[in-house]
Image: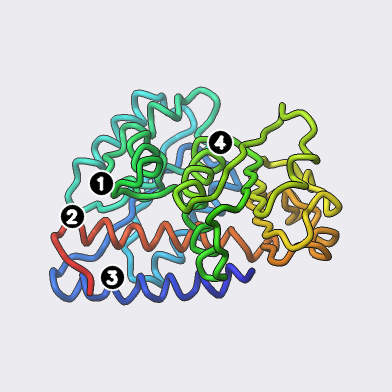
Amino acid sequence: MDGTSLAKRIVEEAAVKAAEISQSTGTVPCLATVLVGEDPASVTYVRMKRARCAKAGIQSRLIGLPATTTTAELIGTLAGLSADPEVHGILLQHPCGPHIDERAAFEAIAPEKDVDGVTMHSFAAMSFGLPGFVSCTPGGIMRLLEAYDVDLAGKHAVVVGRSAILGKPAGMLLLAQDATVTYCHSRTADLSRIVREADVVVAAVGRPRLIRGEDIKPGAVVIDAGYNPGNVGDVDFDTALTRARLITPVPGGVGPMTIAVLLAQTVDAAANQLGIQHR
């Protein structure tokens, strides 16, 4: 499953919408990214996202905070951005450091600017099928499945991972498409047996090659949302490839889709806040 090509199309569509917004209102859609400290991986991710914003005609504002920033200070920064009419989307790059209460920080983001889909409001909207922004990686996964015409109705989907912004929302979005969802995690007994029953596997646990190829049901669809050092996913790709009907590579599968959904949702947020209806 080629996430790179699909992500390119999504970003191109977002760029067209961003241009329409800029031309009709004189306002350029703006994504504010908050970075606490200088974690090398986070700095790289932020640089990549800013470059993609530029290609999509989205203004990118970077707010760099020192590693010593407190939770209260971070909440204050996010609340200020939430109140700033020139900012349409807010991204808090995480992890922020062990001393930061990330949940409290996320909740300081106004729901209408939560283009990363990390607040409790966004999770509830995903779960109840209400308007709102989806978590970007699960949203990218769903777009991949749709693009490859994967019919989820009645299928058994196994999500390996239960993080608040990946595993849990991925399961909710799959459930909304009438899949029967099983959540697994690090404490699941006999994980291999459960995975072998899956028509769709979403690996999102952050453990390299945890899912073995021999445990993939022949003809299953495999989504590897893991990324580990050395460009290794959570699935043993080479062996899974021999059994899966469709599978995402690492890199080039889910990763590009995450950023694409972030940009698309930023443009949608700008349109919503400016009262514009896209054609």
Disc 1 designates what residue?
112
**SS state under label 2:** helix
- Which amino acid type is marked by label 2? Gln
Q: Which residue is mark 3?
A: 18
| Residue 71 location (% of width, % of height) | 40, 25
Question: How far apart are labels 2 and 1 at the CA level?
Answer: 8 Å
Which badge, 4 or 3, comes first in the chain's sequence?
A: 3
Q: CA distance from mark 1 to mark 4?
A: 22 Å
Q: Which residue is mark 4?
A: 163
Q: The residue under label 3 is which amino acid type?
A: Ala
User: Considering only order in the chain, which callout, 1 or 3, is on the residue closer to the N terminus?
Assistant: 3
Residue pictured at 64% horizontal, 49% vertical: 202
**Secondary structure type for disc 1:** helix
- Name the kind of residue labelled 4 in the image: Ser
N-terminal label among 2 and 1: 1
Cα gap from disc 4 to disc 3, whole angstroms: 31 Å
Residue 235 lies, in percent from the top left, at 76, 52
- In which quadrant is the C terminus drawn? bottom left
Q: Amino acid at mark 1?
A: Glu
What mark, if any, has residue 273 been given in the picture? 2
Question: Crowdedness of circle 1 by 10 Å Cα count: few (<14), some, many (20+)?
Answer: many
Q: Earlier in the sequence, mark 2 or mark 4?
A: 4
Instruction: Give the colour scheme shown.
Output: rainbow
Q: Nearer the viewer, mark 3 or mark 1?
A: 1
Screen quadrant of the N terminus: bottom right
* 177 relative position to 189: left or right: left
The structure residue drawn at horizontal position 53% and vertical position 36%, both measured from the top left corner, is 95
- The secondary structure type at the circle numbered 4 is loop
Q: Residue furthest front?
A: 154
Asked whether disc 4 touches disc 3, contact meaning CB atoms under 8 Å apart, the reply is no
Q: In the picture shown, does residue 210 fall above or below 154? A: above
Mark 2 or 4: in front is 4
